[in-house]
Each structure stands twice: as C-alpha cells, then as structure tokens.
Image: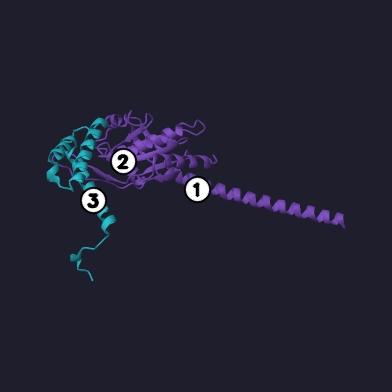
Chain colours: A cyan, B purple
Amino acid sequence: CSGMAAPTMAERKACWGARDEFWQCLDSHGEDAAKCEKLRRAFESRCPQQWVKHFDKRRDFLKYKKKLETEGYSPPEAAGKS
Amino acid sequence: LRRRLAVVCAVAGAAAAGWLYLRHQKERQQRSRRLQHLRQLALGQGDFQLQDTSGAARSKADFLGRWVLLYFGFTHCPDVCPEELEKLSRAVELLERDPALPPLQPLFVTVDPERDDAAALARYLRDFHPRLLGLTGTPEQVRAAAAAFRVYVSAGPRDADGDYVVDHSVLTFLVDPDGIFRDCYSRSRTAEEVARSVRGHMDAYEPLPP
C-alpha cells in the first residue's frame, strides 16, 4: 500500500539532519559504523527506507570519489583483460 | 574635373546604398523564413497535455506569451528535487526584483503520476515559490511530456511498503514566450547563474513575427 504521503519540508529537514549527524560521526570515527550505532538508528527512524538506501549509496559514491581524488585510479587486477 | 568626380562619387554612393539595401532585404527574408520554421518547430516541440493542481487542463499553448522555467521531479524525492526547486524559486525571485523584465512562470512536472496527484503536488509545492505551478496527468500524458523534453525517467523497485524512488534527468528548461526551448540548467548551476542566463536570453529575445 503506497498510500503514504510524501515527507513534508519539516520531515525532510529532520531526515537530512539525522543523516548529517550520522555522517559526521562516521567522518570522525574513520567510517567505523559500529561506533555510530545510535545515530544510525536515529537516521533510519527519521527517513523513509528508500531515502536511507539512496543516501547510503550517495555516501559510498562520495567515498569512492574522494579515494579517486587522493589515491588515483588503479584498475582492478582481477579484470584479466589483455 | 571636380564635377565629374562628384558625379562619380554620387553614382558610386547610390550603387553602394542600393546594394546594401538589397542585401539587408535578403537577410530580413532569410531571418523571417527561419523564424517561420522555428515557429512551426515550437508548436510541435516540447508540447504537453497535463493538468494543474486545480484540475484544469494545461498545454504549452497556455503559457505562450510568458517565459517558462520548467523542472521535472517527484514529491517523494530524497534531496535533489527540493534543492533544485529551492534554486528555481530563488532564481525566479532574483528576476522578479527587476520590474523591467517580462514575467517568468515556474513550472513543476511530476515524473511520478501514480503518487503525485493534484493534492499531493499542491501540498509539496507550498514550500516553494508561490507562483510555482504543478502539473500532473495520466501515466501516458506524463510519459509523453517527459519524452517531448527528452527527460530520462525510470521508477525504481518497490520496497515492502510499496515505496520507491524515481531516477530522472535533473534539468531545468527555459522556454521563451513563443514556446521555443532556449536553454537548460543542470544541478551544477547556482540560482544566481540561472538568473543571469535567463536575463541574458530575455534581453536578446526577439518575438517571432505574427
């Protein structure tokens, strides 16, 4: 049943705030999600599940992008193309 | 001798003037033909048949005579759509400050007609520019509108609650008072940049001859 209404502006901002707090915790604990359990739970309770998935993917992408910028690109060795 | 020189100059001058006049006429005809072609294109290109939040039928013809800034999105959007709509609202506000500029109509077209009916759109758009008008329709009408603007739309898989996100191109389109597409703005442009660009188009605009 997809009768849920879309989040209001206030709900969106609460979700983004919870997400930002969780991400800040990850930033200061070297991506150790175990140290940020409480904030993770708050984030999941404040945001629709679809948004949590979306933001998790965004986080992964941002981390990957940062890695490319700092470490440079090295193709995976298992590619086996020659 | 001086009189002959004067006559030669006068004749040369008249010939040059005549040539310039003929060239000017030719250019005007070419421009007019091109504008006729554009006018035909404008009627066919980027048209839509949708309904606004009061239930009234709206097509592109309803907006002729006004500049339009148009964004495709959906109300269940996690972050991109609210941010783009804030930007759109701010750009319109910046342009409204100049009373010499022609009116600009902000439009929001949903890419999620199943959930975004008139009521949902009205509720969502309340948080943005007061003149921002929402458009929805049947899935076929919305699909046609997105296709007319070459906007990519792809609804994601539904989860246990039936919730889903819709992947879509993030673009704001500028359409002129003749209904001709003039520019598009991506996520990376700021409100100020969009306003500056729209103003540039407005200043350079020449209406199609009737």
Query: Which residue is at a point 42% across and 34% down the rendered structure image?
Result: B92
**Where residue A63 is drawn, which disc sits there?**
3
Quadrant of the rendered structure where residue B128 is? top left
Residue assigned mark 1 = B37
- Which is more N-terminal, label 1 or label 2? 1
Between disc 3 and disc 2, the foreground one is: 3
Q: Is residue B129 left or right of residue A54?
A: right
- For the residue carrying disc 3, how many other residues have a C-alpha within 10 Å: few (<14), some (14-19), or many (20+)? few
Query: Which residue is at a point 71% across and 51% down the rendered structure image?
Result: B18
Examine the rendering and report whether any part of residue A71 can be seen: yes
Q: Nearer the viewer, residue B190 or A3?
A: B190
Residue assigned mark 2 = B142
Q: Are marks 3 and 1 on the same chain?
A: no
Q: Is residue B206 left or right of residue B158?
A: right
In the image, residue B153 lies at what x, y percent? 28, 46
| Helix, strand or loop under label 1 | helix
In the image, residue B109 lies at what x, y percent? 33, 38
Amino acid at dot 2 = Val
Kindly identify which chain the residue marked by label 2 belongs to: B
Kindly identify which chain the residue marked by label 3 belongs to: A
